[in-house]
Amino acid sequence: MADNPLGAGLRLPDDVPLVRKLGHELIEFLPVGVYLCNAAGHLTTYNPKAAEIWGEAPDLGKQPIKYTGAYRLRSEDGAHMPLEQSPLAAVLLSKKPITNLRMIVERRDGSQVPILANIVPLLGKDGNMIGFMNSIQDLRQHAAQEQAQNNLQNALVQAQKMEQIGKVGGGVVHEFTNQLTSLSMSLALMEKEIRDAGSEQLQARYALCREATDKVTQLAEGLLLFARTRPRTLERIDPNQLLLGMSTLVGNEAGQKIHCQLNLATDSSFLRANRQHLESAIINLVTNARDAMPAGGQLTLSTFNSQLDRSNFPQHNANFKPGRYVAIRIEDTGTGIAPEALEHIFAPFYTTRALGKSTGLGLTMVRSFVTDMNGQLTVTSRLGEGTSVSLYFPCHGTEHSLAITGGEGASTGE
Ligand SMILES: Nc1ncnc2c1ncn2[C@@H]1O[C@H](COP(=O)(O)OP(=O)(O)O)[C@@H](O)[C@H]1O
Ligand SMILES: [Mg+2]
């Protein structure tokens, strides 16, 4: 149709050299592959992008090449498409364009390129068929983008799910903790009677109940922290004093086979955090370190100040503010974490421990807490050598800790 040239094909003068010239000059630099075939379906010209998609640059001087420079064509569903029955051949007969046709170019080396083809018949002045032009768009990038989009969508759904779990979990866990408190209290009341009764079997069973209750209470507390439903009071904390105060607990938690060392910088700044959450974060990290050293090893807890900016602290999390930070570092000489696992360890419920042994919420909670305190968390690990987790908190005030009274095993360092 005259008023819609594309609707019925491009109307061109019956001048093949001109068509060729047009082909060469206009299509040379297009980011889409473009090629022309004559009325017999023989390839007459193509641009570099078409050759890139085909994976080869056909020699037009040799025997005629029909319909396409591609080694083979496949339909979108992967079925082999014989050229004589392809839409390319059909256009020459029907003189009607074919738009947005998805196909697959199979190259000689077997690799495949998804394409979007737009085939336009080229018609002479009197409507006779001169050939067709096919513009082929490389969909590989598009496919990658689609994949990225899908991944993003999945991540979003996952995040929304987690948020939902957080909300629902918060309510349920409150109910849990109430019930657990009465269970715990009842157990405590029974303890003396059971001890007095003198039955070893009864005592062993009691110990089991106690242990299970403690575990569940711990889990519930963790979930509460994760769901962030608990009111939190912040206080000024001297990290050195905090670690000194925790050293016995840490030592017990680590067990006999692990040598614990404190490495406290005398000038450590104060920080501001919820004390209970900070202690719980440290204990969580200590337990992880202990579990990574089943045959024993060295556990080092240290504090130090650090001036962080974007260049010397590239691993910063979102909403990082450059400035003065004080760090608490927990370091072990354990199994280490494989690089491919490193990206998963903060995911809720990610655990490599036996089913039922652990919750996989430890690091999730630690990071959530540190982020809540406007802090930063970094993990470095080497398989077979050990792991180091550092919690950075913004310095609070200009005073610093001088009061190191030398706790057990304490040594000072810079
Ligand atoms: N210090 C560490 N050394 C080696 N692996 C660790 C260490 N800390 C954490 N991990 C790995 O990260 C996983 C997740 O830790 P966490 O969130 O605390 O959950 P959980 O301790 O319940 O497994 C652990 O199962 C373990 O594989
Ligand atoms: Mg843990």
Image (cartoon, rainbow, N blue to C red):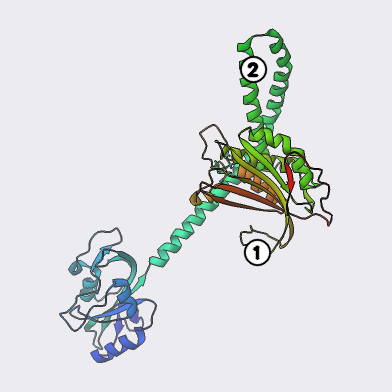
Secondary element at tag 1: loop
Between 20 and 55, the one lying in front of the other is: 55
Residue 5 in the image, given as x and y percentages of width and height: 34, 82
| Viewport quadrant of the N terminus | bottom left
Type of residue at label 1?
A: Asn
Within 8 Å: ligand 1 and the Cβ of disc 1? no
Of labels 1 and 2, the one closer to you: 1
Residue 331 in the image, given as x and y percentages of width and height: 63, 46
Instruction: Give the residue at x 71% y 15%.
Output: 190
Residue 192 in the image, given as x and y percentages of width and height: 73, 14
Q: Quadrant of residue 41?
A: bottom left
Give the left or right position of residue 81, taking residue 381 as reference. Answer: left
Secondary element at tag 2: helix
Type of residue at label 2?
A: Tyr
Q: Disc count in the image?
A: 2
Ligand 1 rendered quadrant: top right
Determine crowd level at label 1: few under 14, some 14-19, many 20+ residues with C-alpha closer than 10 A: few
Instruction: Give the residue at x 40% y 63%.
Output: 143
| Viewport quadrant of the C terminus | bottom right
Give the left or right position of residue 364, taking residue 196 as reference. Answer: left
For label 1, the residue is: 312
Image position of 204 with respect to 225: above or below: above
Within 8 Å: ligand 1 and the Cβ of disc 2? no
Q: Quadrant of residue 2?
A: bottom left
Between 227 and 255, the one lying in front of the other is: 255
* Label disc, if present, on residue 384 of the rendered structure: none
Instruction: Choose the circle earlier in sequence order: 1 or 2.
Output: 2
Give the left or right position of residue 354, taking residue 185 as reference. Answer: left
Contact between labelled residues 2 and 1, with CB atoms less than 8 Å apart: no
Residue 105 in the image, given as x and y percentages of width and height: 28, 67
For label 2, the residue is: 206
Instruction: Give the residue at x 30% y 64%.
Output: 112
